[in-house]
Each structure stands twice: as C-alpha cells, then as structure tokens.
Amino acid sequence: KNQVEQSPQSLIILEGKNCTLQCNYTVSPFSNLRWYKQDTGRGPVSLTIMTFSENTKSNGRYTATLDADTKQSSLHITASQLSDSASYICVVRKNNNDMRFGAGTRLTVKP
Amino acid sequence: NAGVTQTPKFRVLKTGQSMTLLCAQDMNHEYMYWYRQDPGMGLRLIHYSVGEGTTAKGEVPDGYNVSRLKKQNFLLGLESAAPSQTSVYFCASRGTGEALYGYTFGSGTRLTVV
C-alpha cells in the first residue's frame, strides 16, 4: 500500500471554479510535505512546502493545509485557469534522501 | 541556466539491449537522483548520489546501475533491458538548501522496451 494516498485520482472543473485536492499519508518519520505540479511531458515543479508546525501556506491561487495529527494535507486552487490543468503530486519527506510520492491527482480545467 | 537536462527524451529498446540515460545539471548541486514514474503509481527512487564519486541504492535499484564521475552528470544504465523497465525516467537534483527550493526535475525520458 502506498504510504501517500491522493484523492481524487482525476478531476474535471470549469474555468474560474475552485477545487480541493486531498493527500493522506502514513509516512514516518515526517520531515516535510510538498505539493508539486507536473505538466504533461514535464518534470514536477514545487508549489509549496509544509513543515510539521505549519497549518497553512499560500502561493498565489494555491493554498496548502497540513494536519500533522491526522496526517492529512490538502491543496486548494482558487479561481482555476486553463493553465492549472496538470497532475498535482503530494510528496512527503522522511529524511535526507527518502521522499515518498503520491500517484497524483490529474486536474483538467475546461473553458 | 538550463537546470536539469535529460537525454534522450524518447527511446525504444528491444529486450536484452543496453542503454545509458544521461542527466546533466548546471546548478552545482551536490545531490542527484533517478526516479521512474509508472501509471497509477508515485515516482519511485532507483538510485541516488550525494556527491561526485558516490552512489547509493534507492527503493527499486534492481536492473539498473549508475555512475557519478563528474559532479554535474549522473548516468543511469540498463545492462539488459526488460519490458518491466518500460517507464518514464526522471532525474532530479538539489542543493543543500532543499528545505527552501526543493528538487529540480528534468523533463523525463520515455523508455519503451519491446
């Protein structure tokens, strides 16, 4: 069983709408959690980083939350744009060189 | 500043053939990684390097070898390709400030083994 589970697997929304992606993890120990955006045919690019003590962090229209007690994180996208169509990957770091990747949520934004 | 460059971008191999994937970074990063990405699964670590001349096994190292003879290059070799190695391969690098900047990924190499 993957130690980082993401839901939904895929999501289709209309341009301008908001959406929330979920990440549940069982990874231990926990160092930090990142959300990455991966455009088709490209490598992942970091959006946000959350450490144990942080509950929420924003990066433009992206807002990430973390509940370290329940081991859950979410990524909220506000006022979606066509360019937000991508896969969003939740990544939990255990230690220096051990990161566990979720399978990603494939988001499609339609006009 | 090109970041992380992977070559080739696409490759088709016959079972049993060998090949080398090249990863080059121009950011003077100490750490470099090779991952594979399969449908419905998260990226999985194959091998990594914490500096020039060093390599270490990751989560799925079998069937692969790596070398880091120069700091800027990290090579991934397949000695005898198998269909199970059909995947998209990503190279990544990071400096010591990963907490701030995260990993920098290449654009990937799509490998098909027939």
Image: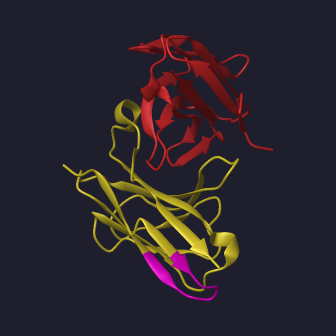
Position of B4 compared to A48: left or right? Answer: left
Residue B59 colored in magenta in the image: no
Q: Residue furthest left?
A: B1
Give the x, y percent position of residue B69: 32, 74
On the question of residue B92 being in view, the answer is: yes
Position of B35 compared to A29: left or right? Answer: left
The chain assigned the colour red in the figure is A
Q: Is residue A89 above or below residue B6?
A: above
Which colouring convention does the figure follow? by chain
Residues rendered magenta in the picture? B12-20
Q: Is residue B2 above or below residue B46?
A: above
The foreground one among B76 and B69 is B76
Residue B15 colored in magenta in the image: yes
Q: Quadrant of residue B100?
A: top left
Q: Residue furthest bottom?
A: B16
Q: Quadrant of residue B102?
A: top left
Q: Is residue B39 above or below residue B12?
A: above
The foreground one among A110 and A52 is A110
On the question of residue A48 being in view, the answer is: no
Position of A72 compared to B4: left or right? Answer: right
The foreground one among A84 and A2 is A84
Q: Residue furthest right?
A: A1
Give the x, y percent position of residue B94: 36, 47
Which hue belongs to chain B?
Answer: yellow
State which quarter of the image contains the N terminus of chain A: top right
Give the x, y percent position of residue B90: 48, 57
Q: Is residue A4 above or below residue B91?
A: above
Give the x, y percent position of residue A37: 48, 34
Count how many numbered circles sit on residues in the image.
0
| Residue at x 49% of width, y 34% of height | A36
Q: Quadrant of residue A104?
A: top right
